[in-house]
Amino acid sequence: MSLTLNIVGAGKLGQTLGRLWQQLGFFQIHSICNRSRQSADAARNFIGAGSACESIAAMGDADCWLIAAGDGQIADVAAQLAPRMNGRDCTVIFHCSGALSSEILSPCQPAAIASAHPVHSFADPEKSLRSLAGSTVALEGEWPAIELLQRAFTALDCELLTIDSSKKALYHAGSVFACNYLTALMDLSLRTFSSAGIERERALELLKPIVLQTAGNNMAMGPEQSLTGPIARGDVDTVRRQLAALAQTDTQLTRCYRQLGLACVELARRNQLPGPLAEELIDLLSEPSR
Ligand SMILES: NC(=O)c1ccc[n+]([C@@H]2O[C@H](COP(=O)([O-])OP(=O)(O)OC[C@H]3O[C@@H](n4cnc5c(N)ncnc54)[C@H](OP(=O)(O)O)[C@@H]3O)[C@@H](O)[C@H]2O)c1
């Protein structure tokens, strides 16, 4: 017989996982609670099972609880659930935040606590039903919970990655660098093109092939082999001219150019940039002392 699962916060992620597990028969969805009754009813209809509840207090007991409210609500939901978990060391409680560890669920112990972060965008639950398989899920927490979640996500054909609980924030920062900061880099690039008189649409057109190619090279060969441009070549004069030109724009562009340039020197060094050229570039790119 399948284990029962309660979902507090059946939004984009909660509804998707609930429906997939219900369809597979891995979990039997029991109670669903959102902020509004209307939203809980809609989630129940999407999942195709379970009872929509007015409040957490109205939810029945279950073998496993998924807290899939927004990150800012997880601590509050855990505090509401905590009194129900007295003596329930066989119950599993987990959340799916990438930024928070399972520690935030500690008020619910002795229930076994964990976090399971699917590296997937649940923007459209209908699409995610078809595209979640193959995504990686990063797990951390207490063993009985991890063991169950490994089976639950394997049943969805997800790849598993177990991470150290104390490293959860670093794990998330890793994705922030590659995803969010890449977007910030695109904006810095467009602002710089704009200062050079190249309008946004034209700049995006111009960037598209090289940005996609660079992403592809990084995936195929890693950053060391993918770095090209003046720093990889040790072309100090070009870097000096670019810094002088950026100094005529705004300070944020110059600062970012310096900091990222220093990261590029580190990378180029690992790919045989001669030491003296690296030192010259580091001197040039370091913030001038005030
Ligand atoms: N979306 C993604 O791509 C994604 C990817 C990986 C991980 N995650 C993680 O998954 C979790 C959920 O994200 P999401 O995008 O699915 O959020 P969402 O679509 O905004 O859904 C959140 C749901 O939680 C409900 N809720 C909020 N506060 C509540 C409370 N105090 N009690 C009961 N229900 C409450 C909301 O109810 P109402 O509908 O009534 O407002 C809503 O249905 C987050 O921890 C997020 O970091 C999301």
Image: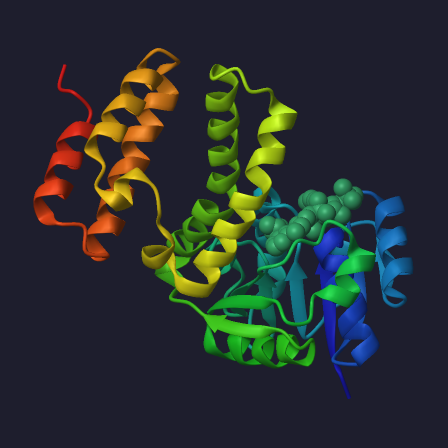
Task: Give x and y (percent) for residue 145.
Answer: 54, 74
Reply above or below: 17 against 173: below
Task: Give x and y (percent) for residue 271.
Answer: 24, 57
Reply above or below: 183 against 104: above
Q: Residue at x 52, y 29 (%)?
A: 187
Which quadrant holds the C terminus? top left
Rendering quarter of residue 117:
bottom right
> 49 or 154, which is in the foreground?
154
Q: Is residue 74 left or right of residue 181?
A: right
Reply above or below: 205 against 89: above
Task: Give x and y (percent) for residue 250.
Answer: 39, 14
> 156 or 71, which is in the foreground?
156
Res 8 seen here: no
Q: Residue at x 76, y 54 (%)?
A: 10
Q: Residue at x 56, y 54 (%)?
A: 97
Q: Residue at x 17, y 35 (%)?
A: 281
Which quadrant holds the N terminus? bottom right
Q: Is residue 89 left or right of residue 244?
A: right
- Colour scheme used in the picture? rainbow
Res 212 seen here: yes
The outermost residue toward the top is: 248
Task: Give x and y (percent) for residue 197.
Answer: 52, 15
> 31 or 127, which is in the foreground?
127
